[in-house]
Amino acid sequence: MQGTLRELDVASLLRLIELGQRTGELFLENAQGQIYFLFFADGRLVYATDNHWNLSRLREFLVGWQLDHILLQVPSTKPGAGVLEYAQVWALLESHELDPSQAIALVQSMMLEVLFEVLPLLEGRFVFEQGTALSPPLTTLVVSEHLSTLVRQVQAWKHMSPLLRHPGDRPVLRHPEALAALAPWVDGVHSLRQISRFTQLPFLTVAAKVHTAVLEGAATVAPHRHPMLPTAKATTARVLCIDDSNTIRRAVDYILSSSGYTVVTCDHPVRAVPLIYEHRPHLVLSDISMPELTGYELCAMLRHTQTFAQTPIIMLTSKDGYLDRVRARMAGATDYLTKPFGERELLMVAGRYLRQVREYPEVPDRSLEL
């Protein structure tokens, strides 16, 4: 099942999935390219997220519980259908860092957040792919039981426009005495959504307080911005390419080395792990279909480390389907490159994510397909 949100609104789509007791994955993409990913089992929502490819959302929830430090202590071992965040919640539960009631409350809060953001979408597209349920299951949510409440919340949020337009808006205090309960976070850096997570206050409560402060002139709002992935500064940008194809490895090495990059290649994902820690690459190019350890699994493992949580990881795949691109994102990938790709495409991707490391190299007009 697939189509556009002009043909079928999100609320009706969710009702169809529930009434049909469908199991699988729903992908929603808005007009700006924002992706949302919802998992269902027998028509009930099991988990939902947007295109978070690290643990920032989970960490922000745990800040409110003063438990954010536990993410550094508990490795994620469950595959979680390639969803790093969901796997990490299970790891925290099994290590007894979270009790069952906390883990369930956490996942349900995440699901309600996403539902709040997708219900107003009027443009974009959707794909529902039937398949096995997200495993292992932790909790479920009957969407129809929450729809009326969510619709009211969305309407209340819309009434705060144009002063507040996006959960990512960042309020700034003009008067220190205003918003005393929120003051530590109202600094122009943290968003409305983050403040809600940090304080454990409902999102609309935070938004209403900020809205009132803005009306009274006690606060201003910096608009939502898309975060840029930080990249380490260096004289020469280092790239690691992992692919079991000798042709791909040699071509990537030749093209990027000729443009001034330092390139290390590896034919096996397990052998790539020590190379990653040895060379500390600024960019990782990884094939998806590899023996013993898939590109998704390798990516999820790197995203769990402090050192490589923000390193750009580009998936090299022979598949060009929408769902494969979303799975790459959900595993933690920054972007993907479909094989066969040309020399110009490779250099453009490298330049895009290594711009802060070195000067963007000139992209030649000649074409060399890999």
Image: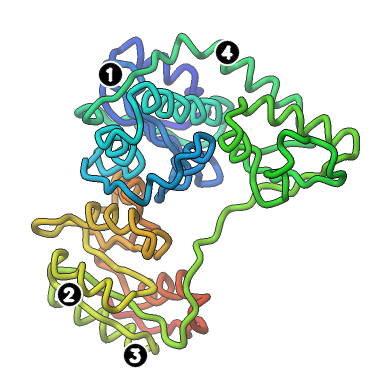
Residue 183 place in picture, x, y as percent: 74, 41
Of badges 3 and 4, nearer the viewer stands 4
Q: Callout 4, which amino acid? A: Thr
- Residue furthest left in the image: 291
Q: Which residue is mark 4?
A: 149
N-terminal of the pair, mark 3 or mark 2, is 3
Label 2 with label 4: CB-CB less than 8 Å: no
Q: Callout 1, which amino acid? A: Arg
Using the rendered view, name the quadrant where residue 89 is placed. Answer: top left
- The residue that appears at 40% across and 65% down in the rendered structure is 311
Residue 229 tag number: none
Label 1 with label 4: CB-CB less than 8 Å: no
Asked if residue 290 can be seen in this view, the reply is yes
Q: Is residue 310 left or right of residue 25?
A: right
Using the rendered view, name the quadrant where residue 178 is placed. Answer: top right
Q: Callout 2, which amino acid? A: Cys
N-terminal of the pair, mark 1 or mark 3, is 1
N-terminal of the pair, mark 1 or mark 4, is 1
Q: Which residue is mark 2?
A: 266
Answer few, some or many: residues within 10 Å of disc 4's Cα (few below 14, many 20 plus, some between 14 and 19).
few
Q: Looking at the picture, does residue 146 appear above or below residue 357?
A: above
Label 3 with label 4: CB-CB less than 8 Å: no
Residue 166 place in picture, x, y as percent: 66, 38
Give the spatial CA distance, label 1 vs label 3.
Answer: 51 Å
Q: Identify the element where label 4 is drawn.
A: helix
Q: Callout 3, which amino acid? A: Ser
- The residue that appears at 39% across and 17% down in the rendered structure is 141
Q: Which residue is mark 3?
A: 258
Q: Looking at the picture, does residue 173 appear above or below residue 249?
A: above
Q: Identify the element where label 3 is drawn.
A: helix
- Residue furthest right in the image: 216
Of badges 1 and 4, nearer the viewer stands 4
